[in-house]
Amino acid sequence: MDIEKELLCQRRTLKIRFRWSAGPYLGRFLLELKEEGRLWVVRCPGCGRFLLPPRIVCAQCYTRTPEFPEHWVRLSGKGTLVDWERVHYPQMDPETGTVRPEPYLHGTFRLEEGLLFVHYLGPEDVQESDLRVGLPVEMVMKPLEEREGKMTDIHYFRIVEGRR
């Protein structure tokens, strides 16, 4: 028997309010990033590794790390360009539903303290043909009034002309 069924649908926007605690380590890290525009890591007293973001226990040697500021190291936000990629895939912000304009550049940077850090490479008009491995970069923060206590408070890393 061939019966045609009418399908009914209803469009709704769900608003799911969700909050979670960042805890004392990640909370301090995000607060410093938001209010002071500074990146911090904790150095494990057991094996000496830098933990970014800071964590209560080192994943390598399982040593408990001290709370801020003991064994915490402020990062300069400066380094060099290791590699980059032009992203041509639209990515949605899961919090707002807005899609990031694309294409955009994403880079890997070796910070002066020796850590690798991955983030946006900017500003938006940076030309890929001008990029080379080893170029000096520095972190650019969003204006204080736009910061939310998230990694995206770092607007991007920019090439620093004249610094070697």
Image (tube, rainbow, N blue to C red):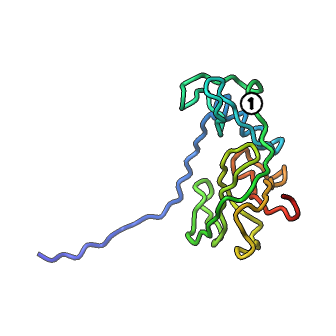
Q: Quadrant of residue 46?
A: top right
- Per the image, the residue denoted by label 1 is 72
Which of the pair 1/140 is nearer the observer? Answer: 140
Label 1, secondary structure: give it: strand
The answer to whether 104 appears left or right of 39 in the picture is left
Quadrant position of the C terminus in the picture: bottom right
Q: Is residue 48 above or below residue 155?
A: above
User: Residue sitting at 58 percent across and 62 percent down?
Assistant: 92
Other-residue count near label 1 (Cα within 10 Å), few / some / many at <14 / 14–19 / ≥20: some
Indicate the quadrant containing the N terminus: top left, top right, bottom left or bottom right: bottom left
Name the residue furthest left: 1
Please state if 21 lies on the left or on the right of 81 as rendered.
Answer: left
Where does residue 122 sit, x and y in percent of width and height?
75, 65
Q: Position of residue 24 (x, y in %)?
A: 68, 28
Q: Is residue 55 above or below residue 78?
A: above
Relative image position of residue 20 (x, y in whole percent) = 60, 37
On the image, which quarter does residue 114 sit in? top right
Q: Tell me which amino acid carries mark 1.
A: Trp
